[in-house]
Amino acid sequence: MTPLPDGNPRLPEHINNPPQNALLEFGSLVAMVGLVMAGLTLLLVLLAGLLAPHIPFRWEAAAVSDLPLEAPWPQADAALNQLADELMASMDPPPAIPVQVRLLDMQTPNAFATLGGHVLITRGLLETITSENGLAMVLAHEIGHIQHRDPIAVLSRSAVIGLLWAAVTGGDNFAMQTLFGQSGGLTALSFNRDMERRADQYALDMLVAHYGHAQGADEFFLSIVADHETGSWQTLFQSHPLTRERIKALQQALPAQGEEELRPLAPALRELTRQDSPEEH
Amino acid sequence: MMLPYELIILLTLLLLGYVFGRLAERRHYRSIQAREDQYRQLLVLAERHLPPEYVTGHESCLVMGNVVVSVDYFKMMIAALRNLVGGSIGAFESLLDRARREAILRMQEQASALGAGVVFNVKLETCRVSGDASRGVGSVEVMAYGTALYPRANASR
């Protein structure tokens, strides 16, 4: 046995504790992972947008079946559905996907197109509208979303992105989700700029096909902009942030001269509008 | 525009973890180096076989030093990111380096209390004691133990 040493040696520090700049390491890691994630997200968004419209509509319809929401005004629903059917029938060729309209008892003026060819319109929206033409524009716009398969495209987009985030962040890692999940918020279930523009154009074409003109198409948008000046409808503006831009585009598409005849709303709808129920305000 | 509060909270936690973690690490390394100098003469050896002169003239006793360290938020984040791209996690290396050396120092303190001049057959054990691996947080125990040899009280016997 060798003799014992005189003392414990003083070993160099850097062997087991290499010098490092943790902040720099953190920054480069975030940049690297962020870049790859952004690239993958972009790719998935593009793929989802390209592929989703090719999902057969009957699969989509089978997945959502019937609307669980109650129908507070069956007669108004019937009138809305009739208007939607007339609008669609005026197109040549008529759109392939059937649409069902439902009036919701909500005060916030809004309209949604959702999966399964369902269009939801709030009572609040009905109250901002005075003519059938204004309502037809809203309906035609949502029909446009449905014919373009926008709801399923949006759902596919957020589903694949959600899957990507979950795979990378490990599902329940709060820190990672917060760090990278913020950009995931951009993928909320809303239609993007191009989808809105395309649906607007589709709706204008539909109005012209049905009425012979697009007069009154901007009624709903003008009304919500006017209401927005008073500070309400924040929520609506968050889901439709491009209203002003859209009004401008719409007005350029409207007939330049002359007041075309606007049709009145169907009676079942008129009795729910602002003029006929002033006591609710 | 709505402020991303979660992100702000996260960045604050990261900054706190970084600043305090760094300060604590520097202070700890200074303390470790000072105490290692203090125990320079109290030998720590991995050797299993005792020299013959120790067998007759010395008592032996188990000594151990134990440390539990926790990961801070900043280290946790770096490790989580490293998990994606691979590579060594330097932040954990320095943490465990400190833990091992601290454990050995505590073992030496026990040995020193016995009046020992040498600890033979030193071994280190590491074990996670709390936390959830999937969330990246947790505490690690590092234990050093060995056989301390100190002169018999009645060495002339």
Image (spheres, coloured by chain):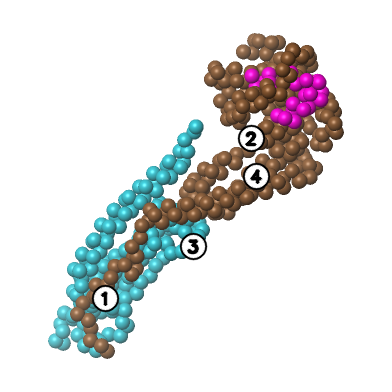
Chain colours: A brown, B cyan
Label 4 neighbourhood size at 10 Å, few (<14), some (14-19), many (20+)? many
- Tell me whether marks 2 and 1 sit on the same chain: no
Rendered location of residue A15, percent (x, y):
33, 69
- CA distance separating discs 2 and 1: 70 Å
Give the letter of the chain under mark 2.
Answer: A
Quadrant in which residue A11 is drawn: bottom left
Identify the secondary structure beneath mark 4.
helix
Residue beneath the point at 34% across and 74% down: B123
Residue beneath the point at 67% across and 13% down: A274
Rendered location of residue B89, percent (x, y):
42, 62
Which quadrant of the figure contains the C terminus of chain B? bottom left
Rendered location of residue A66, percent (x, y):
76, 36
Identify the secondary structure beneath mark 1.
strand
Residue B49 vs residue A177, the one in the foreground:
A177
Checking the image for residue B44, the label placed there is 1
- Tell me whether marks 3 and 4 sit on the same chain: no
- In this rendering, the answer to whether A86 lies above or below B34 is above
